[in-house]
Amino acid sequence: MKAQDTLLYLDGVSVSFDGFRAIYNLSLVLQSGEMRAIIGPNGAGKTTMMDIITGKTRPDTGDVYFNGEVDLTKHDEAEIALLGIGRKFQKPTVFESHTVEDNLVLALSGPRSAFSTLFHRQSKDEAERIREILDTIRLHDKRDWLAANLSHGQKQWLEIGMLLAQDPKLLLVDEPVAGMTDAETAETAKLLREIAKTRSVLVVEHDMHFVRELDVKVTCLHEGTVLAEGSLDFVSNDQRVIEVYLGR
Amino acid sequence: MITQWFFSHVDRRGGIVITLLVAIAVLVPLSNLLLPATSPFHVPTYLVSLIGKYLTYAMLAVALDLVWGFCGILSLGHGAFFALGGYAMGMYLMRQIGARGVYADPVLPDFMVFLNWKELPWFWYGFDSFWFAALMVLLVPGVLAFGFGWLAFRSRVTGVYLSIITQALTYALLLAFFRNDMGFGGNNGLTDFKDILGFNIQADITRSLLFATTALFLALAVFVTSFIVRSKLGKVLVGVRDAESRMRFLGYRVDRFKLFVWTVSAMMAGVAGALYVPQVGIINPSEFEPANSIEAVIWVAVGGRGTIIGPIIGAVLVNFGKTYFTAAFPEIWLFALGALFIVVTLFLPKGILGLYGTWKSKWTDRTARNRDAVLPPVAAVRSGHTPIPEPQAAE
């Protein structure tokens, strides 16, 4: 397959840290508008893969293309974020000493230079978008709360809201339901399916119930490379996947 | 219209402080110049200069708080920018002496004649003009901070490593300015000033005007800081302070925001130094001492970092203490300062202003519970079901 027709294209990517091979010959293709779930045991390289896509880690070898033409290995975190790749971290990282609303204001797409932010005044359009996002993530009544005072689940939701505010073409979501109740997990699956209607999403998750609820193509990583790819049933019947998960 | 614009960029506390500073800028000189020395409201000239000096320290503290309290950049070398601004002003004041120096050379300052220099070094050109010197007060610290910050922030030097290299910066400048052949008066620095803008620098009226100027510039610094921290840029800075890499993943060029606020802060410190020198009458390399910069950090910590008026309170209180202690018990001052820093770090992480906030919320909590207690039906129903919560320390 050629890089031109894809949203995200990783080919033969490898990276090692002090001799430890975190990613080895990883190839992955994501189409525009697709949602993909990435599974794999601890240490399979899921988070490192996200680090490579978002510019935090440079691969030793291999190609990483966004939108078929942009070489992501040549850009830093801020540039990649502006290209339209948003990332949600495993541990919710919201700005704790800011209010819920200010967290969204910071994430909202728009000019990012020092001078434009110094003289920035919120437009009606922006206020409207923030209101919409607050509705979507159900934090409308907590808009003036400091983010530090939110519960764990609410912080996860706020972070998803911040991703929406960034208005990215591709969302990278790292373990969105870790530490959530069953009800919150089901809600989050619903929310992600809603988001995937208009953008591409890459979800890393351990929780198989959640992956089943997402109902999308699954890629299983092991020791930094792709072990199996296909529907969840196909992947979970693969002999090697079973070995990896259940131990040898 | 202008007042409306003004008040939309400061909070209530900031507005009060700016109003107070403008008031003392008017009242203190008036009392010094017009009231007889016997009046209880007369402010003697030595006190005018002393408070004026405190206010320049307060301005340095505001500048430091802008980078440390709001952006998390702990500078242990902000005294360097203060001293550079001071030297720029000192060079102007030296040139104003003219032929009235000991050696009566119309162009060369005394120390250059003493060192057998034949002509003025190129970097002293232009300092006979006040406006050129005023420009240098901003430009020299600004350009140094820009260059330093550009290298440091682009290479993502943060935390304690950045603090250490700021300390190295001020120490390197200290050593350089000690050298006679640098052309800045070496060990003795610049002193013996005669007049500023044609006014005799020793006269009461000049001292009062310098005081008023300092108070007004401090008010301006408070306004600029409020403007920055209340803008969206200020929210970005706090975001950088609390979660720098998250800010990058949102698409902000963190290094540029740091560079902006760092340069603004250095220029503010330079102005403070320029106002300091004519009021104390001397500038020498000891102003670059790392200990001075660390003391400035203590002022901010004591007053409350991340607040706008905390640093002013901290700078004035600690320096008042220093003036008193170094006269009454000179040998224990450094112990007192060290103890103060430990106490503040351990028990008052948010400084004096944080303490005030805790008292205030405790008081509101108690009044709220008292109010509930005088409403018997509600209180009865409540106490039947839920235990009365223990008073909690505010966060």
Image (cartoon, rainbow, N blue to C red):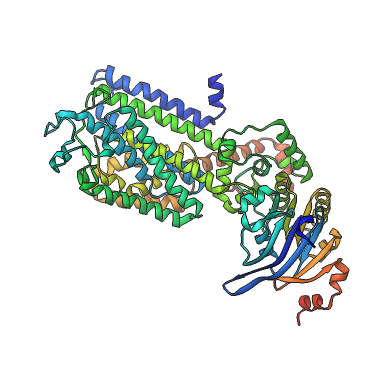
As rendered, which of A132 and A53 lies closer to the eye?
A53
Quadrant of res B216: top left
Residue B116 locus on image (x, y percent): 13, 42
* B315 lies above or below B8: below
Residue B20 locus on image (x, y percent): 43, 26
Q: Residue furthest left?
A: B103
Q: Residue furthest bottom?
A: A248
Q: Is residue A246 left or right of residue B72?
A: right
As rendered, which of A72 and B53 lies closer to the eye?
A72
Residue B34 locus on image (x, y percent): 28, 17
Residue B313 visible to the viewer: no
Residue at figure coordinates x 46%, y 36% from the top left: B309
Residue A121 locus on image (x, y percent): 63, 32
Quadrant where the N terminus of chain B is found in the figure: top right
Residue at figure coordinates x 64%, y 67% from the top left: A61
Residue at figure coordinates x 68%, y 31% from the top left: A123
Q: Is residue B196 left or right of residue B167?
A: left
As rendered, which of A7 and B292 lies closer to the eye?
A7
As rendered, which of B342 and A238 lies closer to the eye?
A238
Quadrant of res B230: top right
Residue A196 visible to the viewer: yes
Quadrant of res A52: bottom right
**So how many labels did they put on this image?**
0
* A194 lies above or below B111: below
Q: Is residue B206 left or right of residue B229?
A: left
